[in-house]
Image (cartoon, rainbow, N blue to C red):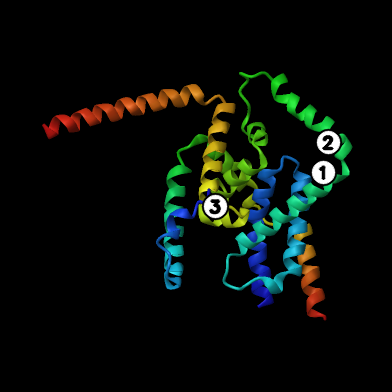
């Protein structure tokens, strides 16, 4: 039974690493988080119910680990925090509003909740329901975060014009089809 | 505000909960395939970024750590 747990853990940790490295730009921090999650999962392995979703379980541990570290760090750098936030907030403006961003940079500019939902559903392959359980919110909330995140990424990467064009083309095509159908119905 | 609102009216019988849950998952997965389509160039960049790491074998240091934990457990 212990062997199955370890094998499953190794398998699930691969996708956990995928998530952590996509979520964090800082690779070293992502790897630390994965290791921390692995150690916690090991120490809690008695709590894991065999046959349930190991990946979802690990992702929940990773999330809690990240959030508690975030709270700790915030407390430690409370004085500097204001200055740091200001500096970070300045950056996008300096880069120019119309500049097209590369994917990695654009992803980094989403807020944590949006980035998390987007990766869970769009890359880790969780359903909205599973992602909602991991995050501790409603599936509808995950759904709107994903679609908001997707929209923002598109805007940051200069997709706006192209997608308008595509939408327009789709509308026109659909319109033509609709007219055909309407004509046939007559 | 509650996203599960819709099902609350229907799910009064405790026996129904399991089958309803299964149904929701299937619907959710079907919706995923639609909204996060393989055609979307932005989403495929996200998946590439993710898969690059997720398809790698686990780094040696993690595997070694796990092996040590396993051995410590066995020798207890």
Residue located at (42% from left, 55% from top):
B27
User: Which residue is identified by label 1?
Assistant: A74
Residue A1 located left or right of residue A172: right
Vertical placement of residue A116 versus A176, above or below: below
Q: Position of residue A86 (x, y in %)?
A: 79, 28
Secondary structure at numbered mark 3: loop
Near mark 1 (Cα within 10 A), the count class, few <14, some 14-19 or many ≥20, is: few
Residue A176 located left or right of residue A111: left
Looking at the picture, tell me which residue is in the foreground, A140 or A69.
A140
Residue located at (67% from left, 56% from top):
B57
Question: Residue A183's image quarter?
Answer: top left
Q: Position of residue A62 (x, y in %)?
A: 70, 55
Quarter of the image containing the N terminus of chain A? bottom right
User: Which residue is identified by label 2?
Assistant: A81
- Labels 2 and 3 in the same subunit: yes
Chain bearing tag 3 is A
User: Which residue is identified by label 3?
Assistant: A138
Secondary structure at numbered mark 1: helix
Chain bearing tag 2 is A
């Amino acid at each position: 039974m212990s062997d199955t747990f370890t094998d499953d853990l190794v398998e699930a940790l691969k996708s956990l690493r995928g998530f952590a490295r996509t979520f964090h730009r800082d690779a070293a921090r992502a790897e630390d988080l994965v290791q921390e999650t692995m150690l916690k999962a090991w120490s809690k392995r008695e709590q894991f119910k065999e046959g349930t979703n190991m990946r979802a379980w690990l992702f929940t541990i990773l999330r809690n680990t990240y959030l508690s570290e975030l709270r700790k760090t915030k407390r430690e750098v409370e004085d500097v925090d204001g200055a740091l936030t200001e500096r970070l907030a300045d950056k996008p403006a300096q880069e120019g509003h119309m500049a097209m961003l590369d994917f990695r940079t654009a992803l980094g500019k989403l807020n944590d909740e949006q980035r998390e939902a987007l990766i869970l559903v769009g890359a880790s392959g969780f359903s909205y329901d599973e992602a909602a359980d991991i995050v501790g919110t409603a599936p509808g909330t995950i759904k709107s975060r994903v679609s908001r995140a997707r929209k923002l990424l598109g805007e940051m990467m200069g997709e706006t014009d192209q997608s308008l064009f595509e939408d327009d083309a789709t509308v026109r095509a659909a319109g033509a089809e609709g007219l055909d159908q309407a004509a046939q119905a007559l | 505000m509650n996203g599960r609102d819709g099902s609350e009216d229907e799910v009064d019988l405790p026996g129904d909960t399991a089958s309803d849950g299964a149904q929701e998952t299937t619907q959710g997965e079907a919706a995923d395939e639609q909204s996060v389509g393989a055609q979307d160039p932005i989403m495929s960049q996200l998946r590439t970024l993710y898969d690059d790491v997720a398809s790698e074998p686990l780094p040696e240091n993690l595997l070694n750590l796990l092996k040590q934990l396993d051995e410590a457990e066995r020798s207890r």
